[in-house]
Structures are given as structure tokens and as C-alpha cells.
Image (cartoon, coloured by chain):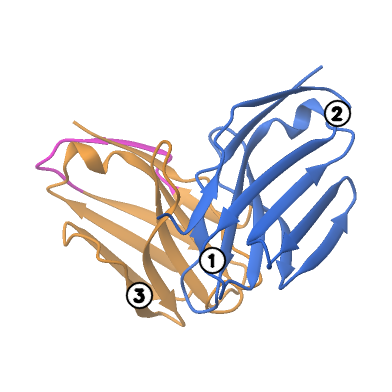
Amino acid sequence: QKEVEQDPGPLSVPEGAIVSLNCTYSNSAFQYFMWYRQYSRKGPELLMYTYSSGNKEDGRFTAQVDKSSKYISLFIRDSQPSDSATYLCAMSAGGNQFYFGTGTSLTVIP
Amino acid sequence: ETGVTQTPRHLVMGMTNKKSLKCEQHLGHNAMYWYKQSAKKPLELMFVYNFKEQTENNSVPSRFSPECPNSSHLFLHLHTLQPEDSALYLCASSQEPGGAGGYTFGSGTRLTVV
């Protein structure tokens, strides 16, 4: 069983839509959760960082962590064509090892 | 640029060649990492350096050899690679060991082994 499961998509939405991206995990010890955005031909860029459970909001982005369900989400409101990228979730129990999802490819159509 | 610079951006090498990938960060970060990114697979952690000391070798074949001469520079030396080693190699750094505050990634080196 993979440590982290993420639907690869591709996901295609019209401009202005609300986007929901999700990851599930199996290790109940995970307590650090992150979302990265990766544009084509670029490295991943940290979008959101959450410690333990709860919600975190930053502009149009909201990250949610539900540790009881081992489920994390990233919501993008009022999606823009510039949001078109691959979104990676990552999580860790501490130590050197972060476990990444395979990434979800998102296209926002003008 | 993110603050982490990788060179070269693209590399094509034969299986008998020796080449090196270079990574440089001037963010004052204390930890540096090599990751491998292959299509449809999660990022694979290869090596970790905390305060210039290697603290993790994630069962990486010996044909990959890292070097960290100082806290700002990281190299990945490559020799006798296999076609399956073709991938995007990403360097990352973090303020604190473990990366709990998040990584800063470079743009990667796209490696093709022929």
C-alpha cells in the first residue's frame, strides 16, 4: 500500500470554478502536511503548510486536514488559468522523510 | 528563480559517461536534498544533507554519488547509469533539517540516459 494516494487526474475546470484536490494517507503518525504547485519545466513550489488538523486559508487557497479520516484537501476558489499546474501533496511524521503524492494535473480553461 | 539554482537544466548522457549535477542555494538553509521525479510516480528522496553531513541515503544505487562541500552547494555525481535512471532530478533546501517548514526546490535537471 502506498503511503500517500492522490488522484492523478487530469482535472479540467472552467475559469472561476471552485477546485477540490485531495490526498489520502495510511500513516496515522503524519502530522506535517503540505501542498506544492509545479508548473511545467519547473520545480515544485510550496503553496500551503499545515501542522496537525484543521483548516488554513491563504487568499484563494484553503487547506484542510482531517486526521481522523486520514484525508487532506486543497480548495482553490475563483480558479484562474494561471492555476493550471500539477499539485502535489506531501506529508511527514517528522524526521527527514516527506512522502509525496503522484500529483494531480489541473487545467483551468478561460 | 526560487533561490535554488540547478545546472545543467538538461543533460543527455551515454551509459558509460560520467557527469555531475550541481545545485546551489544562497538562502542560508541548513539542509539540502536530492529528489528523483519520474512520470506518474511520487517524488523519491535520494539523499539528505544536514549541516553538510549526509544523514540519509535512501537505498540509492552506488552509480549515484552525492557530494556536499559546503552548506550552499550540493553535487550529484553520475556514472554508468541505466536508461531507467532517466528522470527529472530535483535539488531542494530547507531552513531546518527535516523540511518541516517546507522545501525550496530548484527547477531540476532533466536527465536522459541513452
Q: In the picture shown, does residue B47 fall above or below B38?
A: below
Quadrant of image for the C terminus of chain A:
top right
Question: On the image, numbered disc 3 is attached to which residue?
Answer: B56
Chain identifier matching the blue colour in the rendered picture = A
Give the number of marks: 3
Q: Is residue A93 left or right of residue B90?
A: right
Q: Is residue A68 above or below residue A80?
A: below
Q: Which residue is mark 1?
A: B93
Disc assigned to residue A17: 2
The answer to which quarter of the image holds residue B74 is bottom left
Is A87 on the left or on the right of B68, as rendered?
A: right
User: In this picture, which residue range is highlighted in magenta?
Assistant: B7-18
Q: Are marks 2 and 1 on the same chain?
A: no
Relative depth, front residue between A9 and A36:
A9
**As displayed, is residue A21 above or below residue B70?**
above
Residue farthest along the front direction in this orientation: A69
Q: CA distance from mark 3 to mark 1?
A: 14 Å
**Whole-percent x, y for residue A92 in the image:** 55, 69
Q: Earlier in the sequence, mark 3 or mark 1?
A: 3
Q: Are marks 2 and 1 in contact (CB under 8 Å)?
A: no
Residue A87 percent location from the top left of the image: 63, 42
Q: Nearer the viewer, mark 3 or mark 2?
A: 2
- Of the chain colours in the picture, the one used for chain B is orange
Instruction: Report the Cα–Cα distance between label 2 and label 1.
Output: 34 Å
Q: Residues within 10 Å of mark 1 (few under 14, many from 20)?
A: many
Cα–Cα span, label 3 and label 2: 42 Å
Q: Residues within 10 Å of mark 3 (few under 14, many from 20)?
A: some
A41 relative to A100, above or below = above
Chain of the residue on which disc 2 is drawn: A
Location of the N terminus of chain A by quadrant is bottom left
Name the chain letter of the residue that bears numbered label 1: B
Query: Which amino acid lies under the numbered mark 2 shown in the image of this protein?
Result: Ala
